[in-house]
Amino acid sequence: MKKLIAISVVFALVAGAAFAVDVGAAVFGTANVLQGNTGKDANGDSTKVTSGGGMDRVRIDGSGEANENFGGYFRIDGVHWSGSFQAAGNAWWKPIDQLKLLIGGNGGDGFIGKEGVTGWGFYQTATDTGVAMGGDNVWGGDIYGYGLNTRYAFYEQGDGQHDVYLFITPMDMLGINIILPFISKAGQETADVFKQTIAQIDLKLEGIGNIALTYVGGKGHKDDKVSDDYSPGTDTKGADIFKGDDGKDYYISGGTVTAVGAGAGTLEPGYDDPASIFLYYGGSFGDLSIDFGLGYHMPNNVAGKSLANPIGIGLGVKYAMETLGVKFRSVVDIPMEETDPMIILADVMPYFVLGDNLTAFVSIGLGMRQPSSLEKKADGKSITGWHFNPYLVVGEEWGAKFLAGIKVWSDGVEQLDGSKITNWAVPIALMVSF
């Protein structure tokens, strides 16, 4: 009997240790009941109305602490935005209250992003389905195809990649965050890895707001080179590469111009990876909150010439009362070269609380592309894209819910016949977290 009691106690202790983890799961699915556009097929007939959909998320995750100094997190996605299986996790150690060392990642959500309502927080969980216009304006390039997103002005923290993180908090108002990319940049030369360090100073000032300055390192610039291979009878070691008028790569050796190709030595690709600096301010004033972002992207090097990148400026505003509210976000890139266009994105979304578990949202957006100076000389035209996306949410923001909406949008680009294609869809979705 004593042995049975002892075994039971040991089993209880082991089980308690093994299951001291908070585990959750989420399943999201979207169906496009109807979808189509106003374009024509190859025969000049109207395109067919179709249906579609898929699973947006099948996830299990959990976190726990071994004690007050050590802990960890895991996430397993059977379905994610990429449509493939993904696994992520991290382990952390906190030797003192002012220092936390973490190795790993969190599956893409990031740790020190500074974007407020302008990023994922604009549509929030509806972003993770196909009912809202969602994430494209945040991380996938804008929905109009102009090549700009809000994270050109707001730092988004490298998508939460697996790396080494140092969180230093000498006082409550000051955070010093450092990301050492030993894992995400594995295999690169150590000097290049350290060049890509991310460092952030994060100030939280009572009565003023949150001010953060983030440096995102880059490797810099390195020209293409021919490797140490030799072509027959010709020493190509370390030769510089240049582009010919035909777009192919060539090198000069012994006064002879030779194309890079079979028998001519292999090409060691160079890189052009400048650093970026982001300045962020976020303030909350009762029902009103404001986010401001400035993104400076250091010049690229093209064919030996330094080319300044556009400067990104972003603004986010949220005004929320008990039964209604409105969100606004906008980003613009200010061109610094005559070859660059000016692009402006702006979204506004009023929402109305119609009941304890019913909320209506109306998202309206514009994307405007102004031609560059060179394009204007060639009679380049401005382009304006737009979207209209009303949808209903039945349920809680952070709980189970049903979503249904209408999506109508256009990139504003003229077709050969002068028409502009309008896309539309009628999506529904279910989101269950437990």
Image: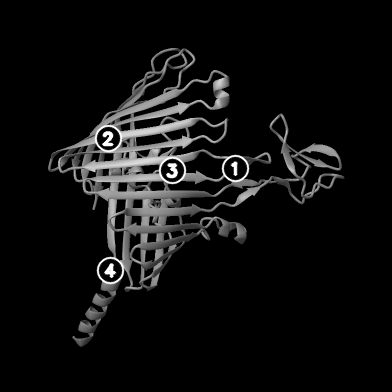
Q: Earlier in the sequence, mark 2 or mark 4?
A: 4
Give the CA separation, mark 3 to mark 1.
17 Å
The residue at which mark 1 appears reads as 300
Give the CA separation, mark 2 to mark 4.
41 Å
The residue at which mark 4 appears reads as 20
Give the CA separation, mark 4 to mark 3.
41 Å
Are the two marked residues, 4 and 1, in contact with CB atoms closer than 8 angstroms?
no
The residue at which mark 3 appears reads as 153
Residue type pointed to by label 4: Ala
Report helix, strand or loop for mark 3.
loop
| Mark 3 Cα-neighbour bin, 10 Å: few <14, some 14–19, many ≥20 | many
Identified at 84% across, 38% down, the residue is 256
The residue at which mark 2 appears reads as 349
Residue type pointed to by label 1: Asn
Identified at 46% across, 61% down, the residue is 178
Q: Earlier in the sequence, mark 3 or mark 1?
A: 3
Give the CA separation, mark 4 to mark 1.
50 Å
The image shows residue 33 at horizontal and vertical percentages of 28, 29
Q: Earlier in the sequence, mark 2 or mark 1?
A: 1
Closer to viewer: mark 3 or mark 2: 3
Are the two marked residues, 2 and 4, in contact with CB atoms closer than 8 angstroms?
no
